[in-house]
Image (cartoon, rainbow, N blue to C red):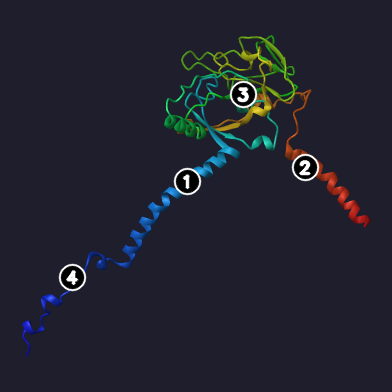
Amino acid sequence: MRSEAEGAVPEEEQTVTSAEEDESPDEGKRKKKQGSFWKELPVLIVVAVVLALVIKAFAVQAFYIPSGSMENTLQVGDRVLVNKIVYHTRDIARGDVVVFNGVDSWDPETQVKEPGNPVSKALHSVGSAFGVAPNEKDYIKRVIGIPGDHVKCCDAQGRVTVNGVPLDEKSYLFTDPITHEQNKPSNDTFDVTVKPGQLWVMGDHRELSYDSRSHRGDPGGGTIPTSRVIGRAFVIVWPLDRLDTLPIPRTFKQAGFKAAGITAPATPMVMGLLGAFPITYLYRRRRQKL
């Protein structure tokens, strides 16, 4: 009969299992996945930034609201999304809230302090691109008159008229939150016929907005070129408690508006469709004769 001592394994032959050997296959896979994630994270960030810049360049861009010229519709600090594709499918319409570039045409409405060092400049450029920092060269206003429109203020009731049709602007003009007094459509009188390729634009806070009325001494007579329009602001996305859309007010949908005397250039898509029908018709006729 063997003793316990005889059946024992000598100390020098005993093996010590390491922590790595004790790990289950699943735990090893988890560690590898975590390591892989951190290695891939920089690549994911770069891809995300590139995609965001591509979308910003061609489709939708965020903009920061730096002034109160569009109150109460837009407040200082709001972030809006701007559709940069919409005017490739339709013309700019009366009542649209548009963002446009004012370089070489209008002076900055707000002064933005120039960053003092290269790092600050780079951060400011990125912030402007993603709508978290103001850009003094971009403006946001409401389109009142399109090419060919006769825009005038004021009629007997103090209203702005477009082609003789009075605008009911109570739904969007600035109203003081304390006194509840609403801005007049304009404290200044004007009588303008909008030239081809131009727009007459005004802010909703008429007593504060430095808009077309204030630039009548400029070469464009206060109007801005349609070619400088970046896109249409269509939604407020920040802060979250102000999340809202920016539709065209009803007053701009009146049936009484007559067609503008000088029509805006047709959009490429419309021209393409109009051109496609006669070409297709001629092509079919030729095929039939053959």
The mark that comes first in sequence, 2 or 3, is 3
Three-letter residue code for mark 4: Val
| Image quadrant where one finds the N terminus | bottom left
Sooner in the amino-acid sequence: mark 4 or mark 3: 4
> In this rendering, which labeled residue sits more in front, label 4 or label 3?
4
The image shows residue 91, relative to residue 206, as above or below, that is: below
Earlier sequence position, callout 2 versus callout 4? 4
Residue 227 is left or right of residue 111, and the answer is right
Badge 2 local density, few (<14 within 10 Å), some, or many (20+)? few
Tell me the quarter of the picture where residue 137 sits. top right
Check disc 3 and give the amino acid type: Arg
Image coords of residue 193 (percent x, y)? 74, 17
Residue 126, image x, y percentages = 48, 34
Q: Earlier in the sequence, mark 1 or mark 2?
A: 1
* Residue on which disc 1 sits: 46
Q: Is residue 60 above or below residue 226?
A: below
Secondary structure of residue under mark 1? helix
Q: Could you tell whether 94 is left or right of 116 in the image? A: right
What residue is rendered at 48% in x and 17% in y?
177
Instruction: Name the residue located 66 percent from the left edge and 16 percent from the top edge.
Output: 222
